[in-house]
Image (cartoon, helix red, strand yellow):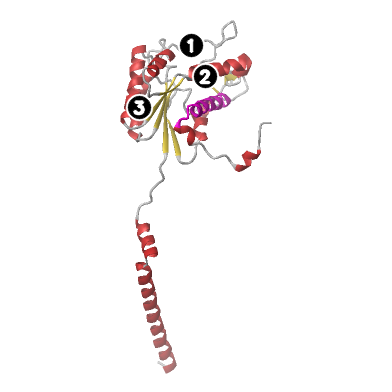
Amino acid sequence: MPLTVKLFSTTKRLISTFQQGLLTALFTVLAYSPVYANQAVDKLQPAIAPHKVTIHMAGDSTMAIKDPKDYPETGWGVPFATFFNDATTVINYAKNGRSTRTFIEEGRWAKLMSTLQPGDFVIIQFGHNDESNNKPDRYTTPAQYQDNLRRFINDVRNKGAEPLLMTPVTRRYFDKNGNIKETHKYSPLARKIAATDDSLIFIDMDAITREYFQALGDAGSALRFMHIRPAVHPNYPNGVRDNTHFNQLGAREVAQLVLAELKRINHPIAKQLREPDPKHLRLSYD
């Protein structure tokens, strides 16, 4: 091998050895430096997720998430879930046609309880199907209805979470004098439970929604429910006139009524709202 090449090869190895030694020394210093040592250790630790507030929703079709084939029918729990910040999770267990009894029998309550954590909130709203005595597959006697609601409340509390009881939202049936009829026979039963439990958070959505839709009148309230003329919407070619279930507008407004009541009573859930986009602050209704 020529001397020049041999010297170059030897020099290259010496430089490489020196560089490796220098890097080793540098890394040793950094590893024992308090700042870098902590960073290295921190990378080995599992990331700690920020605390999330979880709101669980138990109810029937007036609260539930819908299949696209049923649109524009919308449960009020759907727009309600969009009101909150990223530190808040809303889990909607509500299902069409469920009463307190069938919600238990089908394992839906057990599923909710299996994920419930201390500090969570559970919104409980049943009644439409419990009181349907012409539908034995879902009907629940008044005594069973109250027992089931008390069970829900106690189960939630035993988990260190907070129950929030509601009466069912109103149906839209006007009498001959232009007043919305009180059709929920089981609302007084839920009110009775709330009246005998001072620590229970209770919202009378039957009364609140009836007053709201009453103020809108017959024509105005119809725009919030599933009233669709024939040959207008592909999901309802023959049309539909449904005075129990909301469309998107009705569901959003009912969700807003719930939020307004939560704010009125200064409930912790109302403190978890999404921050408005700054550009929206430049807008106004006036």
Q: Which residue is mark 1?
A: 183
Asked whether the residues under the numbered discs 1 and 2 touch, taking CB atoms below 8 Å apart as contact, a structural biologist would say: no
Q: Which numbered disc flags the more N-terminal residue, 3 or 1?
A: 3
Element class at badge 1 = loop
Residue 152: x %, y % from top left? 35, 24
Give the x, y percent position of residue 48. 38, 49
Question: Which badge, 1 or 2, is on the more N-terminal residue?
Answer: 1
Amino acid carrying mark 2 in the image: Ile
User: What is the secondary structure assignment of the residue under circle 2?
Assistant: helix
- The quarter of the picture where residue 162 lies is top left
Give percent across and percent down for residue 195: 39, 17
Gap in Å between the C-alphas at discs 1 and 2? Answer: 14 Å
The answer to whether residue 146 of the structure is visible from this angle is yes
What label sits on residue 109 in the rendered view? 3
Residue carrying label 2: 208
Q: Nearer the viewer, mark 1 or mark 2?
A: 2
Q: Looking at the rendering, in which quadrant would you find the C terminus?
A: top right
Q: Is residue 213 left or right of residue 58?
A: right
Type of secondary structure dominating the magenta stretch:
helix
* Front-lying residue, 8 or 171: 171
Local packing at callout 3 (Cα closer than 10 Å; few below 14, some 14-19, many 20+) is some
**Residue 57: within the magenta?**
no
Q: Is residue 260 magenta?
A: yes
Asked if the residue at tag 1 contacts the one at tag 3, i.e. Cβ–Cβ closer than 8 Å, the answer is no
The region drawn magenta spans: 247-267
Left/right of residue 247 with respect to residue 111 in the rendered view = right
Looking at the rendering, in which quadrant would you find the N terminus?
bottom left
Q: Earlier in the sequence, mark 2 or mark 3?
A: 3
Q: Residue at x 34, y 13 (%)?
A: 143
